[in-house]
Amino acid sequence: MARSPEHPQQPSPPGVPESRAPAGWVVAVLLEPGRDLEQGRRYFAIGRADRAQAEWVAVDMAISLGLRVAASPAGGEEPVQALVPLSPVRMRALGLASGERRDLGDRRPRRWLTG
């Protein structure tokens, strides 16, 4: 059964409770090396259930911030990587609404990656 465009979220896999199904993602975007060698990644929280869409939104956000996204893997790291799925319960706890996107900065966002 095809889903309508108004509801792009995919149903949860069998055996996964609805409250644990991904409703968003924490995505890391690898940046091209610049003046500051410490700034290698930028992290984003994306309130989209579809992983690929969340990764594209994160890349678009990085570009809109004026950051240069790496075009190929470096040091075994992919240029764009969805790190952690966010359940609806976790998103509510962190204050991320469905469809919302948030720049988490260049430091590893431990609060977003645990739980």
Image (cartoon, helix red, strand yellow):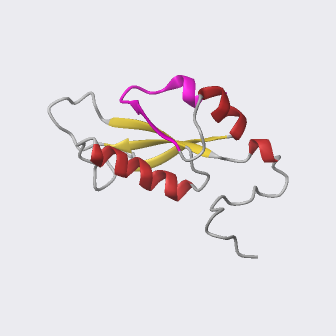
Which is more toward the observer, 59 or 15?
A: 59
Which residue is pictured at 78% across the width and 42% down the height?
19
The answer to whether 36 is drawn above or below residue 30 in the figure is above
Which is more toward the observer, 5 or 58?
A: 5
Q: Is residue 108 a member of the stretch shown in magenta?
A: yes
The answer to whether 50 is drawn above or below residue 61 in the figure is below
Which residue is pictured at 39% across the width and 25% down the height?
107
Q: Which residues are magenta?
A: 100-115
Which part of the image, by quadrant, shows the N terminus? Answer: bottom right
Q: Position of residue 42 (x, y in %)?
A: 36, 36
- Quarter holding residue 85: top right
Which is more toward the observer, 7 or 86?
A: 7
Is residue 79 visible from the viewing direction of this image? no
In the orientation shown, which residue stands out farthest toward the bottom? 1
In the orientation shown, which residue stands out farthest toward the left? 35
Q: Is residue 91 a member of the stretch shown in magenta?
A: no
- Quarter holding residue 14: bottom right
Which part of the image, by quadrant, shows the C terminus? Answer: top right
Q: Position of residue 28 (x, y in %)?
A: 43, 41
Which residue is pictured at 75% across the width and 55% down the height?
12
The answer to whether 7 is drawn above or below residue 73 in the figure is below
Is residue 4 visible from the viewing direction of this image? yes
Horizontal relation, residue 107 to residue 22: left or right: left
Q: Position of residue 24 (x, y in %)?
A: 59, 45
Q: Position of residue 15 (x, y in %)?
A: 85, 52
Please count the marks in the image: 0
